[in-house]
Amino acid sequence: LAKTTQPISMDSYEGQEVNITCSHNNIATNDYITWYQQFPSQGPRFIIQGYKTKVTNEVASLFIPADRKSSTLSLPRVSLSDTAVYYCLVDRYNAGNMLTFGGGTRLMVKP
Amino acid sequence: DAMVIQNPRYQVTQFGKPVTLSCSQTLNHNVMYWYQQKSSQAPKLLFHYYDKDFNNEADTPDNFQSRRPNTSFCFLDIRSPGLGDAAMYLCATSRPQGENTEAFFGQGTRLTVV
């Protein structure tokens, strides 16, 4: 499975847009990209998933360039409650359901 | 409304005393996962079930075992807990991986070994 690389931490201020980039150079044709959010002492929570181009939902947008070797999670106008760890996962269709987490990015939103 | 329920939320066990953590789901998902998460680290996959098919990660110690008696329930057994096994244990469920598949996680069980 493709290994992912993310920044260890990021700081932002309330109201700003935050972009977290994940590198997955070895992504394969059957791989798709999923992002999870985790608050302290809670289980991770699904944010968004995509295969290519752009995906948007009520929480975030996911940008995936044509070569799919990276992806960017975009959080519009963050608030203090968006302080969390964000994980980028690359998983393969029908690959035995691995759901393997990489290092994650610790986002700190300041007032 | 909780869809993946882990019990208990906090568990204290003695060094070497077997302990069982439980997970139940109301989603009727085929796949159930167990993760170990230590402080400031990412969740580490221990094993998962696809229906009754058990898949063990290569580096999961033999000290960790699992049972899935039916679709709804899954158990994590730690046969002889050591101090290094103190962690948050997370259970998750999903449909078989594919497009638009998301995993649902429980709140976790925080295990303390004394």
Image (tube, coloured by chain):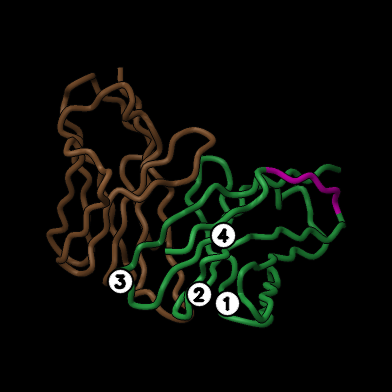
Chain colours: A green, B brown
What's the distance in space between the residues labelled 4 and 1, CA to CA?
11 Å
Q: Which chain is disc 4 placed on?
A: A
- Residue found at x 44% / y 35%: B38
Disc 4 crowd rating (10 Å Cα; few below 14, some 14-19, many 20+) is many
- 3D distance between C-alphas at marks 2 and 3: 20 Å
Q: Are marks 2 and 1 in contact (CB under 8 Å)?
A: yes
Where residue B12 sits: x, y (%)?
31, 26
The residue carrying mark 4 is A88
* Quarter of the rendering occupied by the C terminus of chain A: top right
Over which residues does the magenta segment extend?
A: A9-14
Q: Badge 1 is on which residue?
A: A50
Q: Which residue is mark 3?
A: B29
Q: Assign a secondary structure to mark 3.
A: loop
Tell me if residue B37 comes above or below residue A21 in the rendering: above
Q: What's the amino acid at mark 2?
A: Tyr
Whether residue A50 sits left or right of residue B42 in the image: it is right
The amino acid sitting under disc 1 is Gly
Q: Callout 1: residue from which chain?
A: A
